[in-house]
Image (spheres, grey):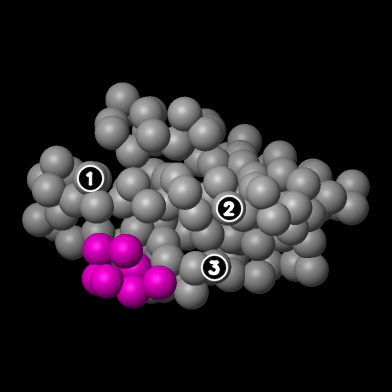
Amino acid sequence: GTTTITAALAWSLQMLGENVLVVDACPDNLLRLSFNVDFTHRQGWARAMLDGQDWRDAGLRYTSQLDLLPFGQLSIEEQENPQHWQTRLSDICSGLQQLKASGRYQWILIDLPRDASQITHQLLSL
């Protein structure tokens, strides 16, 4: 549902000449599949942050006007214990605020998970 709508909206906006960043905030990491990213691709902004790497390196250029920021693949242990890692992802909010302020993107679309997790609340506050 929401992942498909987010992907379609991102595609439509870039077809209208808008610069779009589409961010996957869902731990299932499925938004990337709508943009032909290989199923085995494990990198993403959350995976980078959990591994102590720069989350910005996880961004992918899809078209000249559409960039994708996948969530990244979580381990089974991480999937079963989200309380152990969600607090470590709060820096993405300030990063997205900086991107918004830069004016690089006219649209920043975020595919949010269906639950009321901590990261969902943080991203909704943007």
Q: Quadrant of residue 83?
A: top left
**Judging from the image, what secondary structure is the residue with disc 3 in?**
loop
Residue matched to label 2: 98
63 vs 85: above or below = below
* Mark positioned earlier in the residue sequence (3 or 2): 3
Q: Position of residue 27 (x, y in %)?
A: 33, 48
Viewer-side residue, 20 vs 33: 20
Residue matched to label 3: 59
* Mark positioned earlier in the residue sequence (3 or 1): 3
**Judging from the image, what secondary structure is the residue with disc 1 in?**
helix
Q: Can you tell which of label 3 and label 2 is closer to the viewer?
A: 2
Residue matched to label 1: 87
> Over which residues does the magenta segment extend?
48-54
Viewer-side residue, 51 vs 112: 51
101 vs 69: above or below = above
Q: Position of residue 126 (x, y in %)?
A: 52, 34
Q: Is residue 10 visible?
A: no
Q: Residue at x 68, y 67 (%)?
A: 62
Distance (Cα) linking label 1 and label 2: 20 Å
Identify the amino acid type marked 1.
Thr
Q: Residue at x 54, y 50 (%)?
A: 96
Q: Can you tell which of label 1 and label 2 is closer to the viewer?
A: 2
Category of crowding for the residue at label 2, using alpha-carbon neighbours closer than 10 angstroms: few (below 14), some (14–19), many (at least 20): few
